[in-house]
Image (cartoon, rainbow, N blue to C red):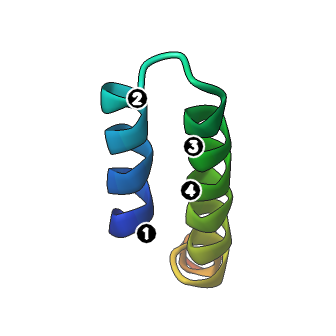
Amino acid sequence: MGISLFTMSFSMHFSGQSQAAAYICAIALTIYIAFFSETWGPVMWVMIG
């Protein structure tokens, strides 16, 4: 999760308004959401219950 957030922030900060940066950010965000839903997401549902 940390690597995907770092990748997203790095591509947003250093690549400007390029189309490749938009794709990299979208892929990094998708990876972040996938890992969150497999690791920390279920923990929140258990704690709420």
* Circle number at residue 25: 3
Depth check, front residue: 3 or 11: 11
- Callout 4–callout 3 Cβ contact below 8 Å: yes
**Local crowd size for mark 2, using a 10 Å CA cut-off: few (<14), some (14–19), many (≥20):** few
Mark closer to the observer (2, 3): 2
**Cα distance between the residues tagged 4 and 2:** 15 Å
Mark 2 or mark 1, which has the lower sequence index?
Answer: 1
Q: Position of residue 31 (x, y in %)?
A: 61, 66
Residue type at mark 4: give it: Ala
* Camera-nearest residue between 16 and 44: 16
Task: Determine whether, in the image, residue 16 is placed left or right of residue 29.
Answer: left
> Residue 27: which numbered mark, if any?
none
Q: Does residue 49 show up?
A: no
- Front disc: 3 or 1: 3
Residue under circle 2?
Answer: 15
Q: Residues within 10 Å of mark 1 (few under 14, many from 20)?
A: some
Residue at figure coordinates x 51%, y 75% from the top left: 40
Disc 2, disc 3: CB below 8 Å? Answer: no
Alpha-carbon distance for marks 4 and 1?
A: 9 Å
The answer to whether one can see residue 43 in this image is yes
Quickly name the residue at label 1.
1
- x 44%, y 46%: residue: 8
Choose mark 2 or mark 1, whichever is in front: 2
Q: How far across and down, in percent of the image, does residue 28 sit?
A: 56, 56
Residue 3: where, in percent of width, then height? 35, 67
The disc, 3 or 1, on the residue closer to the chain's N-terminal end is 1
Q: Nearer the viewer, mark 4 or mark 2?
A: 2
Kind of residue indicated by mark 1: Met
Whole-number angstrom distance, CA of label 2 to CA of label 1: 21 Å
Tell me, yes or no, whether the two marked residues, 4 and 2, touch with CB atoms within 8 Å: no
